[in-house]
């Protein structure tokens, strides 16, 4: 088994990082943010408590990523990303995930941070913690170990605008170093909006990689996280609403346990050309297992709709479009082969 630790390569890495820093200075490259930069004159933000999440809540960002809560227990939350990565962490999003798994590898981490680190938020609060991470290939053939030191600081409050809207936020920056050294490797900055209950912007600046930034597009709800019985009743309500309701008329829905409610409202009806599979039934499904199904264009009735979910005291809203297929079912439609699951 191949094992790599930051301690083993620390001396070599330090030399190369120093050389890289000198080269950057020679070329006039601007210095990355490596320490706290406190804000002044920001808005008064009322709610600074640790956020809570419920199964089904979904946050979509402008980089195309959607994170969905699929399970929760106490301070721990399990997320599923749009590409199927499963991530396990604390409600406190400032702390890195302690487990994750994708198609090729999985990670396990030991983290010294307390689950409520820095909460309730207040300007000037800071906390340091250590991470020991093991990343293993899913086939078990390779395993790498990493050690990191982090320091997180609440820098203040600021009003920012993202695609989802304008929000009063707390800005928290977390700085990552090679364990046991002052060699900076990364700065991760969050803008947390209490009105949403999640961060609305995250920016990552690295010592040796391109920077990345994501901004919130919507705080919605994914019914795929519901149990089968609730999904079936929601689909039935949705199909009836799209078939029978006039624009602007909503149909209510309630989960079996009564903890989740929704209002499904069509808002606009129109005709549009869409692509659908050329053949229906088992023949085309069998063909799809080997290659993409053949498609054809039809003119279909389509509807824009709003699905507004009440999750405890929070409203999570989806704005979507569906079209009616020849079999009478309403599905999300696009220029690519549509999903077999009805839109909801």
Image (cartoon, rainbow, N blue to C red):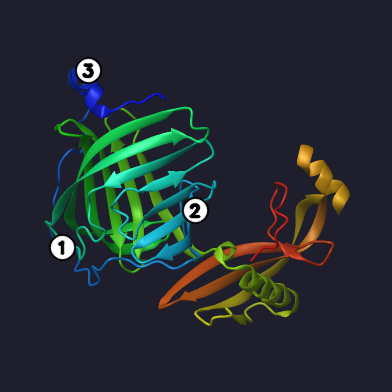
- Secondary element at image label 3: helix
Q: Nearer the viewer, mark 2 or mark 1?
A: 2
Tell me how many marks there are.
Answer: 3
Number of residues whose C-alpha sits closer than 10 Å to that of mark 3, classed few (under 14), some (14–19) or many (20 or more): few
Q: Is residue 297 left or right of residue 221?
A: right
Residues at marks 1 and 3, CA–CA distance in whole angstroms: 39 Å
Residue 49 percent across, percent down from the top left: 25, 68
Residue 140 percent across, percent down from the top left: 49, 32
Q: Is residue 248 left or right of residue 208?
A: right
Residue 63 percent across, percent down from the top left: 46, 46
Point out the tag, 2 or 3, that comes first from the N-terminus: 3
* Mark number displayed over residue 80: 2
For the N terminus, the image quarter is top left
Say which residue appears at 81% left-offset and 67% top-offset: 328
Q: Is residue 221 left or right of residue 190?
A: right
Q: Residue 338: in sight, yes or no?
A: yes
Number of residues whose C-alpha sits closer than 10 Å to that of mark 2, classed few (under 14), some (14–19) or many (20 or more): some
Point out the tag, 1 or 3, that comes first from the N-terminus: 3
Q: Residue furthest front?
A: 1
| Location of residue 209 (image quadrant) | top left
Q: Which residue is mark 3?
A: 12
Mark 2 near mark 3, Cβ–Cβ under 8 Å?
Answer: no
Say which residue appears at 24% left-offset and 61% top-offset: 116
Q: Is residue 223 above or below residue 134?
A: below
Point out the tag, 2 or 1, that comes first from the N-terminus: 2
Q: Is residue 126 left or right of residue 238?
A: left
Say which residue appears at 34% left-offset and 53% top-offset: 201
| Location of residue 320 (image quadrant) | bottom right
Q: Which residue is mark 1?
A: 122
């Amino acid at each position: 088994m191949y094992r790599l630790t930051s301690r083993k390569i620390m001396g070599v890495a330090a030399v190369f990082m120093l050389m890289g820093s000198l080269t950057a200075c020679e070329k006039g490259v601007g210095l990355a943010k490596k320490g706290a930069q406190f804000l002044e004159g920001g808005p008064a933000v009322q709610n600074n408590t640790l956020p809570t999440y419920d199964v089904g809540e979904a946050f979509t960002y402008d980089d195309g990523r959607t994170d969905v809560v699929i399970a929760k227990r106490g301070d721990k939350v399990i997320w599923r990303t749009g590409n199927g990565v499963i991530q396990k962490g604390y409600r406190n999003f400032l702390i890195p995930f302690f487990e994750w798994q994708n198609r090729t590898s999985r990670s396990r981490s030991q983290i010294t941070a307390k689950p409520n680190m820095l909460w309730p938020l207040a300007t000037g609060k800071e906390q340091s913690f250590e991470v020991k991470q093991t990343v293993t290939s899913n086939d078990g053939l390779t395993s790498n170990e990493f050690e990191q030191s982090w320091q997180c600081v609440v820098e203040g409050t600021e009003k920012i605008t993202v695609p989802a809207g304008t929000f009063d936020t707390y800005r928290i920056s977390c700085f990552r170093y090679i364990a046991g050294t002052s060699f900076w490797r990364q700065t991760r900055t969050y803008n947390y909006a209490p009105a949403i209950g999640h961060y609305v912007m995250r920016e990552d600046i690295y010592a040796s990689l391109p920077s990345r930034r994501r901004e919130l597009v919507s705080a919605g709800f994914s019914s795929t996280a519901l149990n089968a019985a609730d999904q079936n009743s929601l689909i039935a309500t949705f199909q009836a609403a799209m078939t029978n309701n006039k624009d602007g008329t909503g149909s209510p829905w309630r989960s079996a346990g009564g903890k989740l409610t929704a209002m499904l409202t069509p808002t606009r009806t129109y005709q549009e050309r869409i692509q659908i599979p050329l053949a229906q039934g088992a023949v085309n499904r069998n063909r799809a297992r080997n290659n993409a199904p053949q498609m054809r264009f039809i003119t279909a009735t389509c509807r824009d709709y709003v699905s507004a979910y009440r999750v405890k005291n929070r409203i999570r809203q989806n704005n979507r479009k569906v079209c009616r297929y020849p079999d009478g079912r309403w599905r999300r439609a696009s220029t690519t082969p549509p999903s077999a699951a009805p839109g909801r």
